[in-house]
Amino acid sequence: MSADSLRGAGLVRRLGAGTFNYGLGQALPQVVRFLLLPVFTLFLTPTDYGILDLAAALSGVLVLTMRLGVPGSVTRFYFDYREGADLRDYVTTVAWFLIGGSLAVGALCLVALPAVLAWTVPGLPYAPYVVLVVIGAVLSANYDLQLRLVQAREQARFAARLNIGRAAIAITLALVFVAALRWGAAGMLLSEVVASGLFLVQAIVYLRPDLRGTFRWGMLRSSLVYAIGILPSHLLGSLVPLATRSLLSGADSLAAVGLFGIGLRFARPLDVVNTAFNRAYTPVYFSLRASGKPSDLDRLAAAARNVWGGAVGLTAGIALLGPPAILLLTPERFHAAAPLVPVLALGMLAQTVYTLFGSEIFYGKKTYLVPVVSLCGAAATVGITILTARRFGATGVAWATTAGLIATALAAGLLSRRLVRLPVRPASFLRIAAAGAAVYALGRLLPADTWTGAGARLGCLAVFPALLWLSGDPTVREAAAFLRNSRREEEEDE
């Protein structure tokens, strides 16, 4: 193999290993939760799931308010401080800030929320649900810091063990609280709170060597400056789900919010893979961009095309298999969520575009552009929700969510091109998208409410790589060549 080929193969392995381990840590718990859906849906109603979705959206807003986006700065500033005394001072500074901010905001919320909850989050009772949400957000402060350090250090296997261990405890407790004790939605939330408390202790143990530094206001100030540039974007990203679900609850019902949540759960494998890839991709992207070599831009462009091919294929699979899964695995009261899965899957695909082309904004520290990107998505999501929630219910909110994600991806891509132009070929991206659309159209001709139809839909997915091969797209050929070269290298090592 040539030197460039070896470097390219190394990048693929680096991204693949990181994505697999991050994905394993997230996907395995999601798979277990998915397999347990037939159990949980026996004991929980769409209204219960509506409460859980509103609670999760509120938790996202509270966590961001407590942290002010500072954990996100750890991934970037780690590469400035590296390991040593400066990094210990930095981690100590961030840890104390997170603890103090979380406790202060948590106490304020417990006092103030009862007065405003009825008109801000209609349908979500204060006790016990909001109380549990606030406690869980406080307890997860240093766990968030730990995850950011693990990501920066590319300790993907450890991240997988952390996520799997935490999820195993939460899922086990959820089974006890919901299936055995019949505590409903409150039992689901309580299981997360207990798991957060246990892993707060674990995070302190992991961070102990890094917490022997000195609190330095200068380091906190630089992180806050970096984070505040991103904060409006993250705040919009948290407020928009809360707003859309609150609007849907007010215009329709908590049950409609629950059906929307079920649709999201069946589209979530795409989100899990995208999040895992993002955690693996970000440090790799920063590293290659820092080299300044044109060849590294070529490698990033090739990786973007290959990732896009995999994302389109996975999207087609979720869009075809998600509806049968809902119809065959859940009680009839949840079946109205089945048509939402293809719509939401399309939005998840847009998140891949954001990851691939929006990373340049963060590398260039142009974080003032992030709110612009987020505002585009938020305006589309909330605007369409207001127009459609009352008439179309959960379906309208699903389309609003997808439209917002597409707007975000387009804005990020256009702004990133002003900073750097990866040598990508748009025709290849369009060809891959057309192949995915063709496979989905073919699969839609098959029934979704029988096991035979679901199996036939699964078989349709084999058409996707075949179409790419026949159309001359290099993605499948490069994947095949990579596998052959990997096998050859293993044989030579032996």
Image: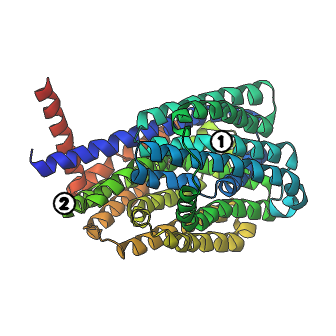
Residue at 77 percent of width and 48 percent of height: 51
Whether residue 445 is visible, yes or no, is no
Q: Which residue carries the number 1 mark?
A: 140
User: Residue 37 occupies which quadrant of the picture?
Assistant: top right
Residue at 69 percent of width and 39 percent of height: 331
User: Residue 76 occupies which quadrant of the picture?
Assistant: bottom left
Whether residue 15 is visible, yes or no, is yes
Q: Position of residue 82 (x, y in %)?
A: 40, 47
Pointer 1 or 2: first along the chain = 1
Residue nearest the viewer, comparing 305 with 432: 305
Residue nearest the viewer, comparing 159 with 96: 96
Q: Looking at the image, do the residues carrying marks 1 and 2 touch, with CB atoms under 8 Å apart?
A: no
Residue at 43 percent of width and 46 percent of height: 152
User: Residue 474 occupies which quadrant of the picture?
Assistant: bottom left
Q: Position of residue 44 (x, y in %)?
A: 76, 38
Q: Position of residue 120 (x, y in %)?
A: 81, 63
- Crowd rating for badge 2 (residues with CA inside 10 Å; few <14, some 14–19, many 20+): some
Q: Which residue carries the number 2 mark?
A: 295
